[in-house]
Amino acid sequence: MSLVSGLVKRLLRRQFSGWSQGSIEEQRARQERSTRLMRLPAGVKCRNVLANGVAAEWVEGPAAGAGVILYLHGGAYVLGSVDGHREWIARLAKATGTRALAINYRLAPEHPFPCALEDTLAAYRWLLDQGVRSSDIVLAGDSAGGGLAVAALLALRDAGEHLPAGAVCISPWADLTLSGASVQSQAELDPILDPDSLRMYARCYAADQPLATPLLSPVFADMTGLPPLLIQVGTDEILLDDAIRLAERARIAGVDVTLQVWAEMFHVFQLISFLPETRQAVNAIAEFCARLFSPPQS
C-alpha cells in the first residue's frame, strides 16, 4: 500500500467514525454535506430527467458513443444519492466513452424492498422505450447498488425480458444476512463499514422479507443465464466475501465473470480519484465495457 493510500484510509476512518449515529435524516444530511465540494471532470454535461417516474440524471462525457451505463448508487439502500456520486459517475462516463443514467431510487425505511428494485427496472425499461438497445446498456453500481444491479438482472431474466450487455459490481453488498467470514475478519481493517450498522440497514430495506431472499441477497441466487459480470473489491473491507461468493455463484452457473481483488484497498476506493489503484480499476471497467459494446467479429 502506498503512503497516499495509507493516509486516505486514516482520513476515511476519522471521517466515517460515528457516521451511522443519529436519525436516518441526520445521517443523510451529514453524507450529502460531505460531497458539496466535488468538481466534475472537464467536458461532462448533466441533465435531469424522469425515467418512468424515477428521478434520474443523464451524465454524459465528451465523445460519448451509443453505450449507456445505468448507474445505481451505494448507501445501504437507506442513504446516498446521485448528488453524492455525480463526480465518480462523471469520471466513469468519461473513461468509458458512454452516457450514464444515474437514478435516485427510493430509499428505505420509507420505501423498503422491492422499491429500489422496481425503480431500477422502471429506469431500464425507460431506456428501452427511448430506443436504446439492451445490448448497449451496462448496469453498474457500488455497494448496495452493486447488489441491486445483480438483483435487477435476476428479475429481468425471470420475467423473460431482454438482458443488458453486462454489469459492473463495485464492492457489492450481495448478502444482507452478513454471513460472509470477512464481515468479522476484516472488521478492524475496514475504515468505512461496520457489521452493526449494516445489520440495521439490512432490516430497514428488507422489512418483513427474509434476508436470504435472492433478490435481496444475490449470493443465494441461481445466476444461470446472466450476462458478463465485472466485480471489483478491496481486501480491507468487510464485504470482501460478498464479492468472492458472488463471483463463485456466477461461475458455477456458467456466467462469464471477472473478479478483481485489490490488495489493501477499502470499500469503493474508486470514489477517490487520485489513487493509482483507482486509475487501474477505472481502466479495467473501461476495457470491460468496450468489450461488451464492440460489435462481434465476423
Image (cartoon, rainbow, N blue to C red):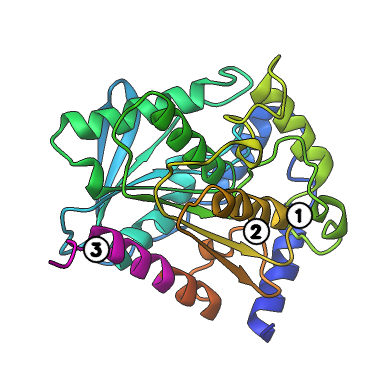
Q: Is residue 89 magenta?
A: no
Q: Can residue 241 be spotted in the picture? A: yes
Prevailing secondary structure of the magenta residues = helix
Q: Please state if 252 lies on the left or on the right of 42 as rendered.
A: right
Secondary structure of residue under mark 1: loop
Is residue 46 among what the camera can see?
no
* Displayed quadrant of residue 161: top left
Lateral position of residue 24 relative to residue 110, left or right = right
Q: According to the image, label 3 marks what residue? A: 97
Q: In this rendering, is residue 150 above or below 114?
A: below
Answer with mark 1 or mark 3, whichever residue precedes in sequence. 3
Q: Nearer the viewer, residue 228 or 137?
A: 228
> Residue 130, percent across and down?
15, 33
**With respect to residue 287, does 27 lie above or below?**
above
Residue 17, given in percent of the width and then of the height, sits at: 79, 52
Query: Which residue is under mark 2?
Result: 267
The x, y position of residue 263, in whole percent, is 68, 75
Mark 1 vs mark 2: in front: 1
Q: Do the residues under discs 1 and 2 have CB atoms within 8 angstroms?
A: yes
Crowd band around label 1 with a 10 angstrom C-alpha radius: few (<14), some (14–19), many (20+):
many
Quick one: quadrant of the N terminus?
A: bottom right
Q: Between marks 3 and 2, how big is the CA–CA gap?
A: 25 Å
